[in-house]
Amino acid sequence: MSKNIRTPSVDYLFDAILSLNDREECYTFFEDICTVNELLSLSQRFEVAAMLRAHRTYLEIAEKTGASTATISRVNRSLNYGNDGYDMVFSRIRRFPSDGESGSEADSEEV
């Protein structure tokens, strides 16, 4: 049984996130609200999800991201049995930075 995340506090946090205007504001806010490790963990899960959607193997994903097979499996379970949040976002952004890139659209590959 999972905890109910729909609380006034979570609504308040999401409203704050939705108020951000650009990537620089995201960096400013998330560097204050998250530890470096928390933010890197979130971005790692997102990268793992993108790689799973690109049909990469667990071994490839683990080598590129440093994620454990347990993390990869957990993300895979969310992709297959979750709320489709990853796919909703992927359909909107459509691109993921290729190896070693900073995320500029010109240097990205399709997910």
Image (cartoon, rainbow, N blue to C red):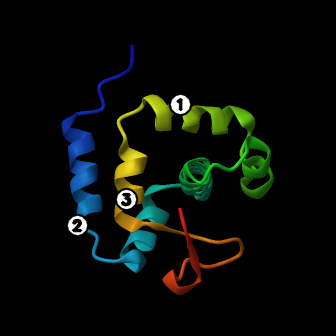
Local SS, label 3:
helix
Q: What amino acid is found at the position of numbered circle 1 in the picture?
A: Arg
- In the displayed structure, does residue 84 sit left or right of residue 96? left
Q: What amino acid is found at the position of numbered circle 2 in the picture?
A: Ser
Q: Quadrant of residue 47?
A: bottom right
Q: Residues within 10 Å of mark 3 (few under 14, many from 20)?
A: few
Q: Are marks 1 and 3 in contact (CB under 8 Å)?
A: no
Q: Work out whether mark 2 precedes mark 3 in sequence or the reverse, and give the earlier one.
A: 2
Q: Work out whether mark 1 precedes mark 2 in sequence or the reverse, and give the earlier one.
A: 2
Q: CA distance from mark 1 to mark 2?
A: 30 Å
Local SS, label 2:
loop
Q: Is residue 83 above or below residue 62?
A: above
Kindly identify which residue carries mark 2: 19
Residue beneath the point at 22% across and 34% down = 7
Q: CA distance from mark 1 to mark 3?
A: 19 Å
Residue beneath the point at 29% across and 25% down = 4
Q: Could you tell me residue 8's position as x and y percent?
A: 18, 38
Residue beneath the point at 41% across and 32% down = 82
Tell which of 22 and 46 is nearer to you: 46
Q: Residues within 10 Å of mark 2 (few under 14, many from 20)?
A: few
Q: Could you tell me residue 19's position as x and y percent?
A: 22, 66
Q: Is residue 98 above or below residue 47?
A: below
Q: CA distance from mark 2 to mark 3?
A: 21 Å
Which label sits on residue 77?
A: 1
Mark 1 or 2: in front is 1
Which label sits on residue 91?
A: 3
